[in-house]
Image: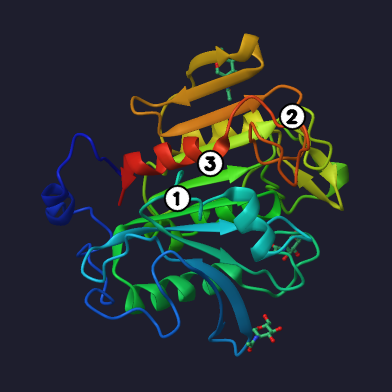
Amino acid sequence: MFFRSIFTSAMILFSGSSVVHGANSPGCGKDLPRVQEPGGSYSTNITTKDGRERSYIIHIPSNYDKNEPVPVIFSFHGRTRTAKSQEKLSQFSNEEYNPNAIAVYPQGIKNQWQGDPSSQGIDDISFTLQMLDHFEDRYCIDRTRVYAAGKSNGGGLTNRLACDPTASKRFAAFAPVAGAYYQNVTEDNCRPNTVKIQCNPARTPIPMLAFHGTADETIPYTGGGRRGRCLPSVPHFVREWASRDDLGGKNETTTTNGGKVEVSRFGDHGEVVHYRIEGLGHAWPSTEPNSDNPDGTYVDATPIIMGFFDQWTL
Ligand SMILES: *[C@@H]1O[C@H](CO)[C@@H](O)[C@H](O)[C@H]1NC(C)=O
Ligand SMILES: *[C@@H]1O[C@H](CO)[C@@H](O)[C@H](O)[C@H]1NC(C)=O
Ligand SMILES: *[C@@H]1O[C@H](CO)[C@@H](O)[C@H](O)[C@H]1NC(C)=O
């Protein structure tokens, strides 16, 4: 909610509208769970309130100190993928990109998330909030610096967290990549540039950074009907966030790579940012080849996401 380079942490703590009271989590001062060490990634299970056994991978930064609060970044895999593949794809455990934050890669039931047309009766928002409670009790976390990113169906869940009245107050910023923002509208009635997007965040502005390739054949940039539901066009999705965040209709546009990458920044501090990447398919942008894209593309999404997250605290 605040722009970190302007406001001091004292102002964040004493602000009446601050939604998280006290930055340091109850886990500060506690030893790491047994078997976990700084620098490692660990696959771990948790039993949720609905009695399900769920799992996630957690990466502890090498410089972790139980008395120093650190940010947490959740990274959600795409449908049919796994927590392990998402750790490799999104690179938040790569300390060249992310030296300081705990990174968490949750595992979806049947490798998918709430929000996909075939995921029924699964509450992944509640699962995410339970993981966050669990981490705040066990690790030393800066509760004003919790972030979410995800690919495709995982980008859809990232958006649902931003749109949720409770989760929107626990996460400081969001970064969906090639997000699948399915709306509960039939294909026949799908008007991708005007479809009403269900979204009820409990604070404003919600910082949102969205990447999407124009050659995405899975979740098309122009939206449309898919698997019985309606996908908004990506510009409509982005403009709706700018409108919800009360940033006005205008954006500051910059292009790089001979016009192939167009960046639209809405708001005085770039509260809503969109990267439109010409010719990129359904992929996590990376200049090096990755499991989504053997050719690489013009930009690396992960360091851009890190820079964006670094701007925002609750
Ligand atoms: C962890 O939970 C998963 C289900 O998400 C299950 O398949 C696996 O066996 C569990 N692992 C352990 C060590 O209990
Ligand atoms: C989707 O829309 C249908 C018809 O309007 C409704 O019955 C159903 O409850 C909705 N589902 C969700 C998840 O909102
Ligand atoms: C940002 O503004 C430019 C120039 O008006 C426009 O072409 C582009 O579509 C806008 N971006 C979004 C996401 O609306």
Q: Residue at x 45, y 52 (%)?
A: 201
Q: Residue at x 22, y 77 (%)?
A: 29
Measuring from the top left, give residue 48's x and y in whole percent.
55, 84
In the image, which is nearer the foreground, mark 2 or mark 1? 1
Q: Secondary structure at mark 1?
A: loop
Residue 280, above or below 4: above
* Residue behind mark 1: 95
Q: Nearer the viewer, residue 200 or 222?
A: 222
Task: Please give the count of numbered marks on the rendered protein.
Answer: 3
Note whether residue 235 is visible: yes
In the image, which is nearer the foreground, mark 2 or mark 3? 3
Q: Earlier in the sequence, mark 2 or mark 1?
A: 1
Note whether residue 200 is visible: no
* Residue behind mark 3: 302
Q: Earlier in the sequence, mark 1 or mark 3?
A: 1
- Determine if the C-beta at disc 3 is less than 8 A from ligand 3: no
Q: Nearer the viewer, residue 14 or 236?
A: 14
**Colouring used for the render:** rainbow
Q: Is residue 25 left or right of residue 251?
A: left
* Residue behind mark 2: 280
Residue 173, above or below 224: below
User: Where is ligand 2, by quadrant?
Assistant: bottom right
Q: Secondary structure at mark 2?
A: loop
Residue contact at pointers 2 and 3, CB within 8 angstroms: no
Q: Earlier in the sequence, mark 2 or mark 3?
A: 2
Measuring from the top left, give residue 236's x and y in whole percent.
63, 31
